[in-house]
Amino acid sequence: MPYALITGASRGIGRHLAVELARRGFDLVLVARSEELMDDLKSELESAHKIQVTLIVSDLSVPLAGEALYARVRQTMPVPDVLINNAGFGAFGTFHDADDHHLHRLIQVNIVTLTSLMRQVLADMLVRGAGRIMNVASCAAFNPGPLMAVYFATKAYVLHLSEAVAQECAGSGVTVTALCPGATATGFHRTAGFPEDSWLFAPPMAERPELVARYGARALFAGRRVAIPGIANKLSVIAIRFLPRRVAVILTHRVLRH
């Protein structure tokens, strides 16, 4: 039975990506910090889809977390057929006021652990000659983001890494997809420290996570390199490409602070 390894699987987009892979008949290895939330998902998916779900409780913000996670997986499992790097979080506020520890954790999860896990799994997939990887980036990847400077920068890294490695893997049987959602109703803004009444994450601005996951799963299995769900998000990315850089940064700043 093929299986997918999914990080950040306890809630939001990651949880719904797990549902989408289960619907396609994949066994799952789900990774997150919350065992209780994953237990509920495991019971739901195993009952509904007759698959096997393995849970790994792991804090991906600590050094060498990616290496430790993959070593643990490979003790009992073959090479994953699908890797989805979904774990990540943001930080809202001015750069100079940010908490150092919080930023270090953010960079560790969004960049360091993602890179390590992707590289290890990719090496094994290339030996096998088959596999699919999806890294969850963001529409934030396409321009700088005042008030979320580090988060936007990490997502630009994820997008550029994914596109570069996708080209390196052309013709190998392994595909790499960057999923770039916009604002999504996942609770992300509360964790990041946005004001509770932020209009950016309220309907109809925020996309439903199940729709983002459905779109992402289709893009993954189609082998698309960059996937941007939602017409509004696609148009915003196109607009940013044509705006002078300084204007795009000013507009992003205004959007984020309201």
Image (cartoon, helix red, strand yellow):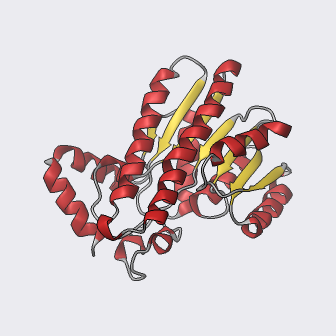
Where is residue 24 shown, x and y percent of the image? 72, 44
- Quadrant of the rendered structure where residue 71 is? top right
Q: Nearer the viewer, residue 64 or 93?
A: 64
Q: Residue furthest top?
A: 171
Q: Report whether residue 225 is seen.
A: no
Residue at x-position 60% and y-position 50%: 63
User: x%, y% of residue 68?
Assistant: 71, 44
Q: Give the side of residue 236 with respect to residue 48, left or right.
A: left
- Compared across the picture, whether 203 is left or right of 235 comes to right
Q: x%, y% of residue 199?
A: 35, 76
Q: In the rendered view, would you say 7 is above or below 2?
A: below
Closer-to-camera residue (212/112)? 112
In the image, residue 145 above or below residue 200: above
The N terminus appears in which quarter of the rendering?
Answer: top right
Q: Residue at x 59, y 45 (%)?
A: 217
Q: Is 182 displayed left or right of 69 in the figure?
A: left
The answer to whether residue 96 shows anywhere in this view is yes
Front residue of 47/166: it is 166
User: Residue sitting at 22 percent across and 68 percent down?
Assistant: 254
- How many numbered marks have been drawn onto this rendered protein structure? 0
Q: Quadrant of residue 250?
A: bottom left
Residue occupying the point 83% across, 38% down: 75
